[in-house]
Image (tube, helix red, strand yellow):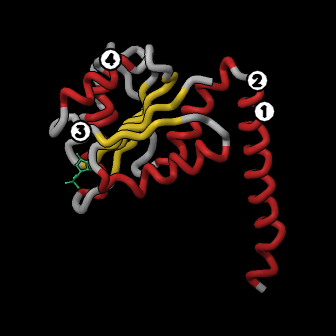
């Protein structure tokens, strides 16, 4: 199976990436994690994305906050699918990172998940890999079923909680 490459702009983004890693592990998807910044280490971010396809990656996930140009900078240097996670910082509740990540120019797409959406980034990466992987698709189907069962269990118990 192709690997998922995870790049975060700073190790202060780690709590969000932890959710991504946990989700990938539950699906047995191989991954690599790096800290490369679009602004502080642009050469490393560029080199990683240029060589990502030949290095066995199938999808890249980039997480950054504030002026969050990382996902876009990565996407500029590869035609692998790039998923952006806007991370919330101390001000603006993540709106700064959301707009910086999602508002890409035509020709260089970034699939942007919700602010701090680390788990959904992993699930979207898994769904991309599952296009060509029936076993992984089954794991995703099973997860949807168990997620739905958990909601229905709450539905069954909600009246009792309120009485
Ligand atoms: C972004 O700036 C990083 O992705 C992080 O979310 C934010 C703050 O970085 P630090 O100052 O905590 O390293 O580039």
Q: Is mark 4 within 8 Å of ligand 1?
A: no
Q: Alpha-carbon distance for marks 4 and 2? A: 29 Å
Q: Say whether disc 4 or disc 2 marks the residue closer to the N-terminus.
A: 4
Q: Please report contact status of discs 1 and 2: CB closer than 8 Å, yes or no.
A: yes
Label 4: few (<14), some or many (≥20) within 10 Å? some
Q: Nearer the viewer, mark 4 or mark 1?
A: 4
Specify whether residue 112 is in view: no
- Residue 94 picture location, percent across and down: 31, 52
Residue most extreme to the front: 55
Horizontal relation, residue 1 to residue 19: left or right: right
Q: Is mark 3 within 8 Å of ligand 1?
A: yes
Q: Secondary structure at mark 3?
A: loop
Instruction: Kindly identify which residue carries mark 1.
Output: 138
The label number, if any, that marks residue 50 in the structure image: 4
Determine which residue is flagged by label 3: 37
For disc 2, the marked residue is: 134
């Amino acid at each position: 199976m192709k690997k998922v490459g995870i790049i975060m702009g700073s190790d202060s983004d780690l709590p969000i990436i932890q959710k991504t890693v946990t989700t990938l592990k539950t699906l047995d998807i191989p991954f690599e994690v790096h800290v490369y910044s679009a602004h502080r280490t642009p050469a490393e971010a560029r080199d990683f994305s240029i060589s990502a396809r030949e290095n066995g990656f199938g999808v890249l996930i980039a997480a950054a906050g504030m002026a969050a140009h990382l996902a876009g900078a990565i996407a500029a240097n590869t035609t692998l699918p790039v998923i952006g996670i806007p991370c919330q910082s101390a001000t603006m509740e993540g709106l700064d990172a959301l707009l910086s990540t999602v508002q890409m120019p035509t020709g260089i797409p970034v699939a942007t998940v919700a602010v701090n959406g680390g788990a959904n980034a992993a699930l979207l990466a898994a769904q991309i890999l599952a296009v060509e992987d029936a076993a992984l698709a089954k794991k995703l189907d099973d997860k949807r079923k168990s997620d739905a069962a958990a909601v229905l269990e709450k539905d069954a118990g909600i009246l009792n909680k309120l009485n």
